[in-house]
Image (tube, rainbow, N blue to C red):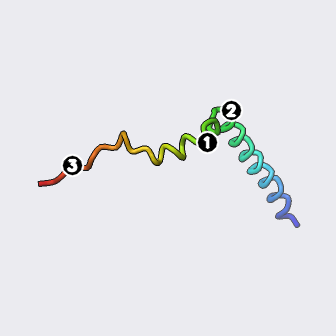
Amino acid sequence: MTSLLFLIPAALCLGGAGLAAFLWALKSGQYEDLEGAALRVLDDTDIEAPKRRR
């Protein structure tokens, strides 16, 4: 029972930290362009050809 005195506040602190990180990501614009990252994987125009060794 005494372990609950430690585990409940620890869980609340970790949950609050996760919520704070999510709100920070939302505020900084991490979720603005969801389709751009998916299409950027398919775009290969900026990849250089591998150099051949002699």
Q: SS at mark 3?
A: loop
Seen from this angle, which residue lies furthest bottom? Answer: 1
Q: Tell me if 15 is positioned left or right of 51 in this view.
A: right
The N terminus, quarter of image: bottom right
Q: Quadrant of residue 31?
A: top right
> Which residue is under mark 2?
27
Q: Disc 3 residue type?
A: Lys
Q: Position of residue 42 (x, y in %)?
A: 46, 48
Q: Position of residue 14 (x, y in %)?
A: 74, 51
Q: Amino acid at mark 1?
A: Leu
The span from disc 1 to disc 2 (Cα, nearest Å) is 15 Å
How many C-alpha atoms fall within 10 Å of the one at disc 3: few (<14), some, or many (≥20)? few
Q: Amino acid at mark 2?
A: Lys
* Residue 23 picture location, percent across and down: 72, 38
- Residue ID at (68%, 32%): 27
Q: Which residue is mark 3?
A: 51
Q: Position of residue 46 (x, y in %)?
A: 36, 39
Are dots 2 and 3 in contact, CB under 8 Å? no
Residue matched to label 1: 34
When asked about the image quadrant of residue 21, the answer is top right
- Alpha-carbon span between mark 3 and mark 1: 33 Å
Residue furthest toward the top? Answer: 28
Mark 2 neighbour density, 10 Å: few (under 14) some (14–19) many (20 or more): few
**Residue 28 in the figure: left or right of residue 8:** left
Q: Secondary structure at mark 1?
A: helix
